[in-house]
């Protein structure tokens, strides 16, 4: 798994391309989540057709992927950490754990408004992207807009820069991003814009990571 660090100005996150063994495992627990039908919609801000809770069996995904990403983020910031230190948590009576894990099915015209997550970190895995931002920009109703303002189907971070201005960082969606995971501070605002002219769902996984006392874990 190749991990990359993204640090635009005063914010940052980590990004990695998952290996096949990780992807196969995620599809497996997605299918199990669909069968269990534990709806997660009431927990979310997203205007989406379906969201189901999934279970990280025996903490496999946490131990094989998330733990490494957390360490990469921590080390890339020279030990700086929002709210708490993961390294301190590991040395004390606290543990980092995956608190909530769910799969989102987003169909055309649906969207996820600007929101943040609870906990210390959050992450997103793009499992299926049935359209491309490049093609979405060609939609007739977007004629006349600047390219930078054509955001149909994209994922976007929204943050305050060092000057106090509202800034953004956009991920143009395409099938090439399938199997990509990003991990970021949970309070980092982000959103997903609606896409059009495609009947297949966009499928993604998300989760929240918490720090909890070992005694209640």
Image: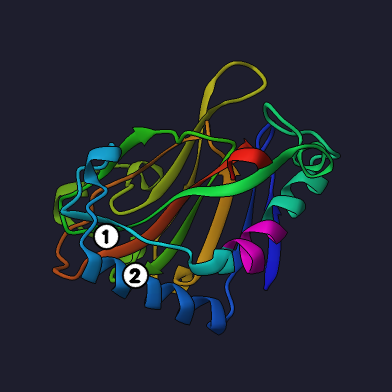
Residue visible at 59% across and 70% down in the picture? 17
Task: Name, please, the residue furthest toward the top.
Answer: 164
Residue visible at 52% across and 31% down in the picture? 187
Q: Between residues 132 and 138, which one lies in front from this camera angle?
A: 132
Residue neighbourhood size for the residue with mark 2, other residues' Cα within 10 Å, grouped as few (<14), some (14–19), many (≥20): many
Q: Between residues 151 and 36, which one lies in front from this camera angle?
A: 36
Residue 37 lies left or right of residue 124; in this view the side is left
Task: Name, please, the residue furthest toward the front.
Answer: 215
Quadrant of the image for the C terminus?
A: top right
Q: In this rendering, is residue 195 above or below 131?
A: above
Q: Pointers 2 and 1 in contact (CB under 8 A)?
A: no
Q: In this rendering, is residue 206 above or below 177?
A: above
Residue 142 lies left or right of residue 53; in this view the side is left
Residue visible at 67% across and 42% down in the picture? 214
**Does any portion of residue 141 appear in the rendered image?**
yes
Residue visible at 47% across and 68% down in the picture? 177
| Residue 66 part of the magenta-drawn span | yes
Q: Which residues are magenta?
A: 62-68
Residue 209 lies left or right of residue 158; in this view the side is right
- State the residue position of label 1: 136
Residue neighbourhood size for the residue with mark 1, other residues' Cα within 10 Å, grouped as few (<14), some (14–19), many (≥20): many
Per the picture, the main secondary structure of the magenta-coloured stretch is: helix
- State the residue position of label 2: 30
Indicate the secondary structure of the residue bearing disc 1. Answer: helix
């Amino acid at each position: 798994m190749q991990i990359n660090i993204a640090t635009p100005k005063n914010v940052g996150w980590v990004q990695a391309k998952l290996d096949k063994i990780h992807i196969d495992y995620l599809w497996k627990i997605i299918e199990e989540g669909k069968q269990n039908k534990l709806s997660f919609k009431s927990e979310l801000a997203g205007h989406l057709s379906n969201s189901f809770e999934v279970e990280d069996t025996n903490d496999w995904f946490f131990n094989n992927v998330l733990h490494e990403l957390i360490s990469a983020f921590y080390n890339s910031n020279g030990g700086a950490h929002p709210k708490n230190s993961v390294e301190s948590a590991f040395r004390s009576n606290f543990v980092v754990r995956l608190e909530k894990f769910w799969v989102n099915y987003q169909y055309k015209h649906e969207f996820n408004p600007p929101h943040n997550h609870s906990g210390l970190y959050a992450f997103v895995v793009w499992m299926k992207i049935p359209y491309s931002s490049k093609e979405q920009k060609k939609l007739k109703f977007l004629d006349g807009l600047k390219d930078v303002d054509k955001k149909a189907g994209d994922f976007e971070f929204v943050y305050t820069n060092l000057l106090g201005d509202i800034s953004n960082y956009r991920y143009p969606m395409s099938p090439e991003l399938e199997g990509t995971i990003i991990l970021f501070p949970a309070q980092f605002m982000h959103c997903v814009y609606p896409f059009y002219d495609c009947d297949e769902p966009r499928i993604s996984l998300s989760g929240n990571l918490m720090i909890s006392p070992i005694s209640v874990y």
